[in-house]
Amino acid sequence: MQVYEMSAFEKASTSIMATEANKKNKTGEPGEKSGLGKDSFLKLLVTQLQHQDPTKPMEDKEFISQMAQFSSLEQMSNLNKEIRNLVLSSKSSEAYGILGKDIEAYDPVQKKSVNGTVNSVFYRGDELMIKVGKEEVLLKNIHSVSVKEKTN
């Protein structure tokens, strides 16, 4: 049976990946995907460069490929942030559009229907809320919106 010994680079990269995985498990941030982020990727690349064999340095093609992957990862991360901001903006516009309108909603926490005119819109954490009189309801729980009828 042959025993495989890890190189210094493999040991370092394994250590970095384990550290990053532990950080993600401990933070438990919602919306975080497991896997390597751009910081981890850059750490691995730097570690690889530091521990490469001077007699067989990394080929230019390989280095350029890894830098391109890093650039793509960073651009995807930035795009993800922008999409998240766009979604929040869209939800805010939707909520502000129902100010002064009559709504019907169901509050699953209090297990009751809420009807009336929307007085205000606000955020509670990441959730958009609307206020109808003294009642507060999540925007996503609204099932009907109508224009207030004018009376003479």
Image (tube, helix red, strand yellow):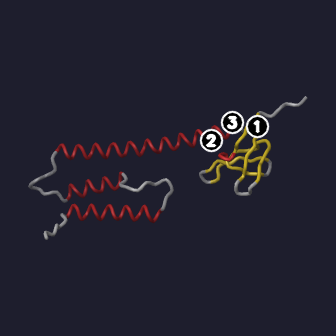
Mark 3 falls on what kind of element?
helix
Residue drawn 21% across the image and 55% down it: 49
Which callout, 3 or 2, points at the residue further toward the start of the chain?
A: 2
The mark tally for this picture is 3
- Marks 3/1: CA distance? 8 Å
**Where does label 2 land, which residue?**
92
> How many residues crowd mark 3 within 10 Å: few (<14), some (14–19), many (20+)?
few
Which callout, 2 or 1, points at the residue further toward the start of the chain?
A: 2
**Position of 110 compared to 42: left or right?**
right
- Marks 2/1: CA distance? 15 Å
Foreground pick, 144 / 10: 144
Residue drawn 8% across the image and 55% down it: 55
Residue 89's x, y, as percent?
58, 40
> How many residues crowd mark 2 within 10 Å: few (<14), some (14–19), many (20+)?
some
> Label 1 sits on what residue type?
Lys
Tell me the quarter of the image containing the N terminus. bottom left
**Position of 11 compared to 92: left or right?**
left
**Where does label 3 land, which residue?**
97
Up/down of 21 relative to 31, above or below: below
Residue 9 numbered mark, or none: none
Mark 1 falls on what kind of element?
loop
Residue 101 numbered mark, or none: 1
> Label 2 sits on what residue type?
Ser
Quadrant assignment, res 96? top right
